[in-house]
Image (cartoon, rainbow, N blue to C red):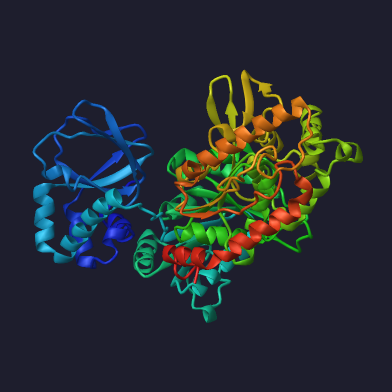
Amino acid sequence: MTLDRHRLCVELQRLDWARQLSQEVIEDIAAEAETSQFATGDEVISVNAEFTNVYFVIEGSLEALLFDRLDKQIHREKFGRGSVLGLFSVVLPESSHLQVSAIEPTTVIHFTMDELLRLTTKHQEFQRSMFAAAANVVKRLVVIDRDLPKPAVVGVVHQSDASRCLAVDLTRRLRQLDEPVYVAGDENHWSSDEGIVFYPLYENGQLISKDAITSTLQKWSALGRLFIDVRADHSQDDLNRLLSYSEVVLWCITSADVADAVQQLEILGRDAPWLREKVRIVWHLTFDNPVPPYVPKLNELSAGDFKTYEGQPSLQHGKLLQRGLERIIHYLRGVQIGIALGGGAARGMAHLGVLKCLEQNGIFVDRLAGTSAGAMTGTVYAAGMDPDYATECFKTDLTPSCFFRWLPAGGYWYLIHKYRFNQFDSMLRKYLNDLRMEQLAIPMTTMAVDLVDGILLERESGDATHNILESINLPPLALPIVKQGRAVVDGGLLNNVPANALVDQGCNFVIASTVTAKLEKDFMSIRSNRQRRASKFFQSLQVIMRQHMIQGHSMNDVGVQPADFVIAPDVTAFDLSEFTRADEMSVVGETTTNESIKQLKAMLAKLDPQLFQ
């Protein structure tokens, strides 16, 4: 990004620490600042160098590695747009223990300590901003920082007119949340009755002057959320100019627009390497055809996607598909809710009741992660399946035939049969077909373990059914899945409740649903004194399954520790093989969640009072 003085003033006003500064102070800062630009990989500060400047990130991102006196790395942190780096280090006499590099094309301004002192002495409001910035550094060190970026300027690009209603719906929803919203665009279809002010960016088919754009954005972005709403068929120069002002770009497409979108994003990206990190693809889909095409190139050209749906959902479609717009609202307001679904064989059917109850109370998650049964229930939910419908499907599909029901411990023999004859694959593909993880309505991560390298495998891409099969591949009922040099089994061996994965993926509120928090105090009917008739093989199987249960129970506290809220349905009355009682376990999950829903809502309200009031 090339910044002249006028443009730098605009960019400064959009930063959190500068929003309350007067125009006079902004202009003085811009006049005194030195500007530097760094390409990806460029070193900004080297270890043991003298720390002489305070840096303010205007655009892009820096990564800082902190080393101790023995040159051992002890901390890593990302500094994005609006971050301040060096407020403390610049006043210390010792050399830097930081190594700072650009992880994308980055623009910064910087001051020496003398220059910064002169400005803060001259302008008390700037001095207060620097005190607040220093306080935020301390806050990050002593408390969990839950703040995610809240983009003030949002670009919305429409590959076709089919998605024009999306920008209207977004602004209307933000107005309901008492946000001041402004729109600058190429077409006036906005209703002033809804309190949305529109400014035309084109006059007689021509983009208005650079000065006019800059002054408008400078004024409005300081007052509230600004949307730049345009079609994709404008010239490359126009789009690059307009999108350079945006902090995030929602590129809206339908399945028919894919080829045009890929071509245009590739062309724009050649002159604007910063674009990829800003772009989020927004799919405009219908319930008749709810699965977007798999387009690897779009994943390379964007930093993520959202799926929105219109039309009339069928009985099998859950409310999840109807809340695509709300997930975009979450993103714009700095909210990312994740739910981790733990393993537990048939007992994991309780997760479907948990998900149902969250939906009924207006809590829609943005990401899921699951292990074993949590991977199976979570993936079908992420594909858009209604929790009640999924419960009935699992109950029907996993009901043993008469032959197995007559056998002692027939439920286990039935599962062994399902595993050994690869029948879970066809069962799941009835609902998922050849769906890939990238095509799910919301992001989903499954957990499995490779016995060869002894490592955890976190699957966020690839064939959804195959990833479930890996995660539910429970020894000794199943043999390892051997493929591509790996021998893969159930992820519960290393991470039975993967809340940490959601934290690593950027969620600032994580819910854990676990069915291993409680353990029944009986084994092989020793305490219940029921008659025990079982073959030696089944007794050996019982021992191994009990070991698995105890391992899951003992690891439970570790798994849920990163979570902010834990839901633990008591399903100890159900056997690990009793999928025929899936509906009963789902009810237990729903009831347990209902009992704590007020507390959950109260916690979410602290994250965003308007969104979760």
Q: Is residue 421 above or below residue 223?
A: above
The quarter of the picture where residue 429 lies is top right
Q: Is residue 504 above or below residue 228?
A: above
Q: Image point 49% across, 61% down: which residue?
A: 206
Q: Is residue 278 above or below residue 452?
A: below
Q: Image point 83% across, 36% down: which residue?
A: 408
- Which residue extends farthest front? 529
Q: Image point 14% across, 40% down: which residue?
A: 52
The quarter of the picture where residue 545 lies is top right
* Residue 460 in view (yes/no): no
Residue 356 at x, y percent in the picture? 66, 60
Q: Nearer the viewer, residue 531 or 303?
A: 531
Q: Nearer the viewer, residue 46 or 489?
A: 489
Q: Is residue 612 left or right of residue 3?
A: right
Residue 443 at x, y percent in the picture? 59, 46
Q: Nearer the viewer, residue 45 or 71?
A: 71
Residue 419 at x, y percent in the picture? 76, 31
- Which residue extends farthest bottom? 193
